[in-house]
Image (cartoon, rainbow, N blue to C red):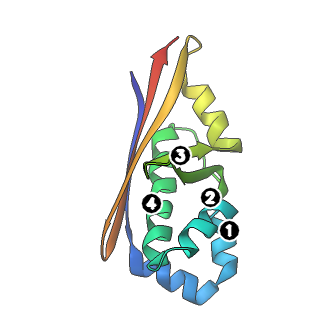
Amino acid sequence: MIIGIGTDICDISRIESSINKFGQKFIDKTFTLHEQEYCKSKSASASFFAKRFAAKEAVAKALATSSSGALSWLDVEVHNDPSGRPQAILHRGALERLKAKTPGDSNSFVHLTLSDDYPYAIAYAIIESRKI
């Protein structure tokens, strides 16, 4: 059963401008150390940062309820499995929201896909609940 969906589109140049204007302060506020290391290892790092920014927004939308507030940027972390498939790792507030949305007799899974075509990056998240 689908218990949440979310999508976000991000202008890569907007993320690049924020990085240029605010530097490491913006990066530290928005991305985990793992995400920073991964993105900085890429030649077009702004595209990778933008995809992760969009992913955080998409997952937050999928977790949102009518009464939920904002999540910390660091509550959603994007990793890639060995094949390169993106995975959302939830921490603190995001993990609490997932647990609250998940029926007691079920496990939840966050499915995430990312793409970019300059000047845009996009992310789509689906949260699925499966009975145990």
Residue ID for mark 3? 88
Identify whether 37 is placed above or below 79.
Answer: below
- Residue at the front extreme? 82
Inspect the image, locate mark 3, and give the three-letter code of the amino acid beneath it: Ala
Identify whether 123 is placed above or below 64.
Answer: below
Residue 29 coordinates in the image, percent (x, y): 68, 68
Inspect the image, locate mark 1, and give the three-letter code of the amino acid beneath it: Lys
Residue ID for mark 4? 54
Q: Residue at left 54%, top 53%?
A: 78
Specify few, some or many for label 4: CA neighbours under 10 Å numbering under 14, 14-19, or 20 or more.
Answer: many
Asked if the residues shown at circle 1 and circle 4 are in contact, with their CB atoms under 8 angstroms apart, the answer is: no
In the rendered image, which quarter is residue 36 located in?
Answer: bottom right
Q: Who comes first in sequence, dot 3 or dot 2?
A: 2
Q: Would residue 75 appear left or right of 53 to someone viewing this image?
A: right
Asked if the residues shown at circle 2 and circle 4 are in contact, with their CB atoms under 8 angstroms apart, the answer is: no
Specify few, some or many for label 3: CA neighbours under 10 Å numbering under 14, 14-19, or 20 or more.
Answer: many
Residue ID for mark 1? 29
Front residue of this view, candidates 129 and 79: 79
Q: Who comes first in sequence, dot 3 or dot 1?
A: 1
Asked if the residues shown at circle 1 and circle 2 are in contact, with their CB atoms under 8 angstroms apart, the answer is: yes
Which mark, residue 73?
2
Residue 100 coordinates in the image, percent (x, y): 61, 27
Is residue 14 visible in this depiction of the protein?
yes
Q: Residue at left 40%, top 45%?
A: 6
Q: Is mark 4 on a helix, strand or loop?
A: helix
In the rendered image, which quarter is residue 99 located in?
Answer: top right
Inspect the image, locate mark 2, and give the three-letter code of the amino acid beneath it: Trp
Marks 1 and 4, how far apart at CA: 15 Å
Marks 3 and 2, how far apart at CA: 12 Å
Specify few, some or many for label 2: CA neighbours under 10 Å numbering under 14, 14-19, or 20 or more.
Answer: some
Specify few, some or many for label 1: CA neighbours under 10 Å numbering under 14, 14-19, or 20 or more.
Answer: few
Inspect the image, locate mark 4, and give the three-letter code of the amino acid beneath it: Ala
